Image: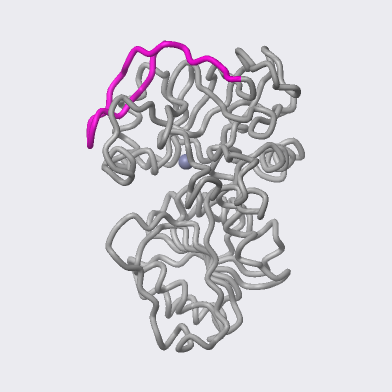
Amino acid sequence: MKAFVMNGFDRVGFSDKPVPHAGPNDAIVKTTRALICTSDAHTVHGAIGPRDNLTLGHEAVGIVHEVGSEVRRFKPGDRVVCGAITPDWGDLASQAGHSSQSGGALGGWKFANIKDGVFAEYFHVNEADANLALIPASVSDEAAVYCCDMMSTGFMAAENANVPIGGAVAVFALGPVGLMSIAGARLKGAGLVIGVDSVPARHELARSYGADEIVDFSKSDPVEQIMKLTGGAGVDSAIEALGGDVAFQNAIKVTRPGGVISNAGYHGKGEFVHLPRAEWGVGMAEKTITTGLCPGGRLRMERMLSMLERKRLDPTRMTTHTFKFDQIDRAFEMMDRKLDGIIKPLITF
Ligand code: ZN
């Protein structure tokens, strides 16, 4: 089968690989749709260290091709979504309620990290009964593929932000995770949702997902603008969807005492992330910082699919470009360099 792989730092290309086989609890899925993620580009630039002939990608849907002897809930021919994170459900971290950390910090992240990812004609899923979910007939592959990561991560950010009904929320960075954080904050009942970004095309999308106000940090100081929009009080919840030291500090600055800073961004650079000491309330202002990695698993995926089935939101508005699998190298380059206003490129198989 054909796979799109990383070959050392900053090198990608196609590779021929054998179709994987399923162990007793596993499934093999024939890929139908996939999305490229900014974190795929991070991986290629060395975020997780060197990898050779590693298939990229972690956001995909498809048709079950083969299941292991112990798999009960799925059979060949089923149309399924698989979470970007595929935990080991028997691990103690999973039993403690932290399945994305099964097997160690971020250990639930296997695709394109410790095993081949989904940018291939077929991909392997561990613990299929726990990690796959059936896609309802009324939900398209093009929409369902957003459950894997963007919806799950964005909604996690809003869940971790403990948004009070009617409360004020600021979302830093309006990439796809930030956009889904906006949608998540609205679904949680936020009264005022402020999106922070400098790219005009993202402003429109953010408004369509429920942002009431947009703060353009390239025009004036975002902290001042957010304080002004909240009458000097600051927000109840700030969501950091970038993974930037300054954005993280700003998130702390604009959060009122007792509020929550929910980090969804991937802090891939520098030795430290900094806390602004005074605005953090010198460590005593009851400002809580929460962190998380995209939740996976069947229950999570079924909940995401339920939102699509009942048309609570339309994630496909984030699909700015579509490519066939044999053009994925071009799509990858565009995503890496953020060309042509790209937000999410959809890959069809
Ligand atoms: Zn992703």
Q: Which residue is drawn at 42% across and 60% down?
A: 197
Instruction: Give the extent of the magenta segment.
Output: 1-23
Q: Which residue is drawn at 61% across and 59% down?
A: 158
- Which image quadrant is residue 278 in? bottom left
Q: Which residue is drawn at 74% across and 39% down?
A: 306
| Residue 331 vertical placement versus 98 (above, below) | above
Q: Which of 153 and 142 is in front in this view?
A: 153
Q: In which quarter of the image is the N terminus?
A: top left
- Answer left or right for 174 relative to 181: left
Residue 137 image position (x, y, % from top left) = 74, 23
Q: Does the magenta stretch include residue 6?
A: yes
- Answer left or right for 87 relative to 5: right
Residue 319 image position (x, y, % from top left) = 49, 35
Residue 238 image position (x, y, % from top left) = 53, 69
Number of numbered callouts drawn = 0
Q: Which colour scheme is used?
A: one colour
Q: Which residue is drawn at 75% across and 24% down?
A: 73
Residue 300 image position (x, y, % from top left) = 68, 43
Q: Does the magenta stretch include residue 157?
A: no
